[in-house]
Amino acid sequence: MSAADGHDPRACSDGNCEIAVSEPVTFRFQGPGGPATLSVTEVGPDRIEYTVKSANGRTQGGASGPGQGCVTVLRDNGSGNSCGGLSGTRPSAQPDAVVIQATTGPDGTALLRMVAP
C-alpha cells in the first residue's frame, strides 16, 4: 500500500498526513483543543483498531474486512466515529476539526489519513 508520507508517523504531528501502518504505533498530533494522540492498537490483513485521546476525552474505532474502515472527527468539544465501507474515499477537511480516516488493507497494512483545517 502506497502512502504520500510513507510509514513515518512524525509526518502527522501537524494533523495532516497520509501514512501506511503495518504494526501498532502511537503518535502525537495537534488536535483542535490542543495535543492529542492516536494509538493503532491492532493491524493485520483487512483489520485495524485504534484509539484517539485528547483533552476532551477518548474515542475508539475499528474495522475488519476488505475496503472497510472508520472515520473519526475530532473537535474541541468531543468526537464522533463512523465505520463501514471506505474503499476509494478520501476525508475532507472540516472547520475546527481534525478528520482521521483508517482503512484496512489486504496485506496487513492499513492506510491512515489525517486532515486538519
Image (cartoon, helix red, strand yellow):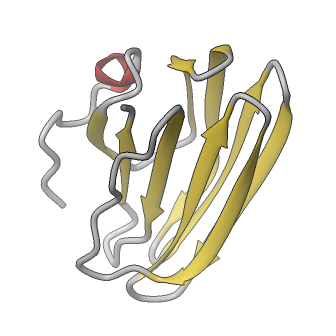
What is the residue that sits farthest to the right in this orientation? 57
**Residue 6 is drawn in which quadrant?**
top left
Query: Could you tell me residue 48's position as x and y percent?
Result: 57, 63
Which residue is pictured at 41% across the width and 88% down the height? 66
Q: Is residue 70 above or below residue 60?
A: below
Tell me the quarter of the image containing the N terminus. Answer: bottom left
Residue at coordinates 57% horizontally, 22% vertically from top-left? Answer: 31
Residue in the foreground of this view, choosing between 107 and 104: 104
- The residue nearer to you, when weighing 98 against 69, is 98
From the viewer's perspective, tell me whether residue 65 is left or right of residue 83: left
Residue 17: horizontal and vertical position, in percent? 28, 34
Q: In the image, is residue 80 above or below residue 47?
A: above
Residue at x 26% of width, y 35% of height = 7
Q: Position of residue 86 (x, y in %)?
A: 40, 79
- Determine which quarter of the picture holds residue 75: top right
Quadrant holding the C terminus: top left
In the figure, is residue 95 to the left or right of 34?
left
